[in-house]
Each structure stands twice: as C-alpha cells, then as structure tokens.
Amino acid sequence: MRGEELVVNEALKVRALPEGGCDYLLEFLRLYRDAVQIIVDRIWDIDEKLSWKKLHRLFYSDLMRLGFRAHHAKEIYVNAKSLMDSAKGNSGRKPVLRKLSARIDKYDYKLDLDNMTLTLKLHNDYEARLKLIASRERVEKFRSWSNYELVVKYEDNEFWVSIYFKRAVRPLEPRTVMAIDLNFDNVTLAIYTLDGRRVRLKKLKTPHKKILTHKIWVERIQRKYPKSWRFIKSVRRAIEKHGERIKNISWDYAHKTGNTIAKLASKHGSVIILEDLEKLKENNKKGRRFNKRLGLWFYRRIQFCVEYEAMERNLQVAKIDPRGTSSKCPRCGGKLVEYGYRVLRCRKCGFIGDRDVTATINIYEKYVSKYSRCGVSGVAPNAPKPDEAPSGMQGNKNEAMTTES
Ligand SMILES: [Zn+2]
C-alpha cells in the first residue's frame, strides 16, 4: 500500500488535420479495418485457445505482404482477438467492422507536443503528418507524462486521435488521516493526526433530496402511463428531462466534493480513507443505511471523483470495510443506539457522539488497525478519547462528542 508506485493512465482525445492530403491515411485505415475483419473471420470458428504466439504464426507474414509494419501487424491481430472475445461474450454474433479506426503502437508514430504535430508511419513506408487541434492548457499537463499508444479514427469526415498517456506516481507519505463518511444527508470528512487527535471537521450537504424529487417525478409519470411511457414522445421527453437533471446535479456535486476533499487532504498531507462500497453491498443487503431508492451509484460517483482528484495530487487513497462504522462504539466496541436527532449513544460505556462524526472515528480506527503494522508510524492503537475531540470541533453543538458518566 504505502510508498508503492502507482501508474496513472489517461487519454487525450483531439481532432487532427492531415497536412498535405489524407489519401494515404484513409487508405491505411481501410486496409487496417479490412485486415482486422479478415482475421476475425478466420479465427471465429477456431475453438482452441489462441495465444499471441499462435496468432503471430498464423497471420504475421500475410500482414507483412499487405505492406504493414511489424507493430501494425501485432496491433491488428491483438485487436481482432479482443473484438472476437468480446463479441462472443456479448451477442455471440460475428462482428462486422464499418468504422475506420486503427490502434497504433508507440514505435509507429512520433508525437511532438511543442509543435502539436503527429507523424504516423503507415503501410508501404508511407507517412502521414497531422496537426493536432487542442488548447495549450489541455496538453500542458501531459508534457511530463509518457505516451505509449494511440487510436486514430475517421468519423463524419474528421480525423480524431486519442493518445494514451501514463505516468508513475509515488504517493506522498501521509502526515494525517482523513476519514470520509458518506450518508444520505451529508459527506462528513474528519482529519486526524497519526496519534488520533482531530484537527479538522467538515460536513458537505448532499443534494440527495433534490435528486429524490426528480426520481419521484419519473416514477409518478411511469405509474400514470405504465405501459405506454416508452412510446409516447412527450412522456419520454419529460422522463428524460428529469434524468438529465439528476445526472447534472450528481456529477456537479461529485466534482465539487472531490475537489474540496482533495484540496483539504493535500493541505494537511492526508491519506484519504473511503468505505469500500462493494463490501457495503455484501454486508448490508437490506440497504438500510444507503437508501435503496438512490442506490450506490451516487456514492460511487463521489468516490470516483475523490479518487481522481487525489491521484492528480499524488495523494494516497485507501478503502476499508464499512461494516459497523455507523453502529459500533469507537471507545468500547459496544452497540450504539439512537439518542436524539443524529446522535448515538453507547449503552455500555455511555459514549455519546454525533452519528457522522462517530462514523469517521470508526473509519479512522479501521484504517489504523489495518495499516499501522505496515508502516504508519506513531499511530495510537486506541480510539481518540471522546473528551479530547472538541478541540477540533467546528459546526454546531450537536456535532461535538460528549461523554456521559
Ligand atoms: Zn462504548
């Protein structure tokens, strides 16, 4: 987990203008497509497993004869095989290729980001030079990355290039731990020092209620036209409109939240701890905590943005099993029960705490007990003492943890 190198991949898709005509490039794309098709046709009925080696033996010399370069050939049969595999997995129908698109290995192109040009090596030693159309800002961040592959496409009379970049990331050593609790009403984040003192607490209200309103509208419409809603244009439109709103609201929120969280984590040098939503699904089939009507998709979207923004800043992200994070006493492990609005109380030891804040303590604890052995130094094995908590307290009185004796 810690200090390991991660590889981050990202594609840059830009429009490209061929310099001095596009005849050879189009010819190449057609030849490439037809070659992939021929291979798909020939391997479709072969039942045995096809290794790369075997594909190479079967098709390499034929492709060379068509004028392709060595790495073109490799890309072509790799492409054909993956097309076949996914077609067999999905529809079971043999794919018929129409679109013009070619995957090209780094040995067969030269990318010049300073001048925004791309030179492609084509069949029969032809070359194509393309001018890439993209703003400086979009390209800037990729300058320090390496690129290893690209895809050229021709659609609607335009050429598009997707360039695949990667970079190695060595995550920063965390100085603090940021625990994040996602629930229906808010996203609660709390930053703890490695010895368990809370230094920051923030709650971000979720737009769940707004999303739910649109969902209810959709359901109402569908109930009114139970059989026909799919076929009446105006009804379908209305449903689409609400769906569009839900999409915008949720992505907007996810982007903002991801950004806020990563910025704070960066400022405090935090490792970000999220709950593993896949485990949550297994643990909590009834979906009591994560409202069923909204599903996990919204939380996934938020986590996706958090992880993305964290990666951009070289921050570590870890996931813990969410079992018990909102129902166990962080002090004695006893069961917590409701004690007024959004407050929980432990019957065994009298611990009282805000529901969301308590969840962050448990999340922090889980992370510490899972990872402390593999390196986070100076981590206290015990939970932060509840009476120490108000030092980092922000927000209303309700959020403070108090003890009752
Ligand atoms: Zn307790």
Image (cartoon, rainbow, N blue to C red):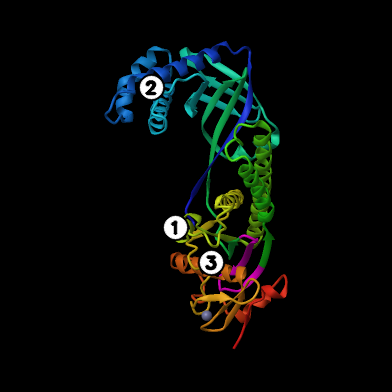
| Secondary structure under the numbered disc 2 in the rendered image | helix
Q: Find disc 1 in the rendering and name its residue.
A: 282
- Residue range corresponding to the magenta coloring: 184-200
| Residue type at numbered disc 1 | Glu
Query: Ligand 1 closer than 8 Å to the CB at disc 2?
Result: no
Residue positioned 59% across, 62% down in the render: 180
Q: Find disc 3 in the rendering and name its residue.
A: 363
| Secondary structure under the numbered disc 1 in the rendered image | helix
Closer to the camera: disc 1 or disc 3? 1
Q: Find disc 2 in the rendering and name its residue.
A: 40
Q: Position of residue 324 (x, y in %)?
A: 49, 68
Q: Quadrant of residue 274?
A: bottom right
* 186 part of magenta stretch: yes
Q: Position of residue 353 (x, y in %)?
A: 61, 76
Q: CA distance from mark 2 to mark 3?
A: 50 Å
Q: Earlier in the sequence, mark 1 or mark 3?
A: 1
